Amino acid sequence: MTTRPWASPRGAWVSVQRHFRERGIDVQKQEFTAVGIGDMSGDVFGNGLLCSEHTLLVAAFDHRDIFLDPSPDPATSYAERKRLFGLPRSSWADYDAGLISEGGGVFSRKAKSVPIAESVRQVLGIDEAVTSMTPAELMKAILLAPVDLLWNGGIGTYVKASTEDHADAGDKANDAIRVNGADLRVKCVGEGGNLGLTQLGRVEYALNGGRLNTDFIDNSAGVDTSDHEVNIKILLDRVVREGDLTEKQRNTLLAGMTEEVAGLVLRDNYEQNLALANAAANAGSLLHVHEEWIRTLEKDGVLNRELEGLPSRKEVARRAEKGEGLTVPEIAVLLSWTKIRLAEELVDSALPDDPFLHTDLFALLPDQDATRLSPADAGPPAQAEIIVTRWSTTWSTAQASRSGRGWPARRARRRPS
């Protein structure tokens, strides 16, 4: 099974598709502009920028270079990105300069200044009087570009809240280019990489109308794939031990599951985004419900409101007066803790022993392979854990559709960034 290398970026791309769908745009069929953090040799950035042939990447930067292509041809630029992705240890400096539109180019971050053409000023929303910028100024302008998508596939924290100091981001190397969430002009953010924004930066951007989830939501496909792989191996290894399957047959079976498991994982990402969208649509009317649940988790010692970047009671009261609710990044944190709490309670209950739920043991398997096993093949203790994971996930999704309490991140990190 080899789905994990692309799992996080393709899963995060499902989130991007959802953000655009809410604007009436199909990114697989319609062109859209983007800026990015990373380069095509990076697994996350590279895979993400190959998810749609209609991506117009106008600017990007990594730790070495700044890439500018103010008016890219979609087919030509896609083909060149694909070439770089397949080129070992490639950088933006390997991009064919003859394919870059007028005014663009690849510039070293070590340069003293970068010339800014009119075409670059227009696409990045830079003042017309500016004719050159330092690399730091240009990278900040890229982050603040008025384009459709900011795709983060790099390392570092580039967005904070206006109420935070740079020290709060914990990434001194990028202090010179970091921007505030309130200043972002991009329509949506895809977090293929981790920790690209502080949680308060996400909330500030979302309160200004920006569309994004969180890194642990967008990146959940990698963990989800690991869940499937581990649980499938647990099921199959018992069959091997009992002599009903040889080691060679087991390995062949695992390899044959790759594409179907990939489909199951991406479906999870789709439903996760749908659940968050449903919760967000009802966030204003359910603010009192969410606040009550936050207080319950606080009282039980499960959640620290300030640590998790959730609004204070005073802020909740202010939002209630304005008819506002929790933002999607805040909902994501709350629902992650909800799922953790639910799973902990279910695993200690009699529910996993209910024969009716034993079919959930094989919900993670491709249909053609699930039929080869029986419920007895799993055995304790994996049986209870798998059933709880599947059932709590299903419950969370159903609740999101009805009441705004949606799907938390699968096996979410205990400390969302």
Image (cartoon, helix red, strand yellow):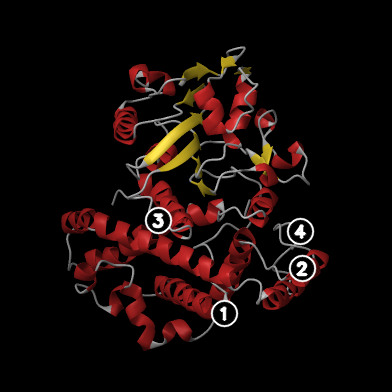
Left or right, 206 with respect to 152, comes to right
How many marks the image carries: the answer is 4
Secondary structure of the residue carrying numbered label 1: helix
Rendering quarter of residue 41:
top left
Residue situated furthest top in the rendering: 112
Which is in the foreground here, disc 2 or disc 4? 2
* Of callouts 2 and 3, the N-terminal one: 3
Mark 1 = which residue? 403
- Is disc 2 surrounded by few (<14), some (14 to 19) or many (20+) residues within 10 Å? some
Please tell me which of labels 1 and 4 falls first in the chain.
Answer: 4
First in sequence: mark 3 vs mark 4: 3
Q: Amino acid at mark 3?
A: Ser
Upstream in sequence: badge 2 or badge 4: 4
Q: Position of residue 253 (x, y in %)?
A: 20, 58
Image quadrant where residue 78 sits: top left
Residue at the image point whose x is 51% and y is 77% from the top:
347
Q: Is residue 378 visible?
A: no
Q: Which residue is mark 2?
A: 316
Q: Secondary structure at mark 4?
A: loop
Q: Which residue is mark 3?
A: 226
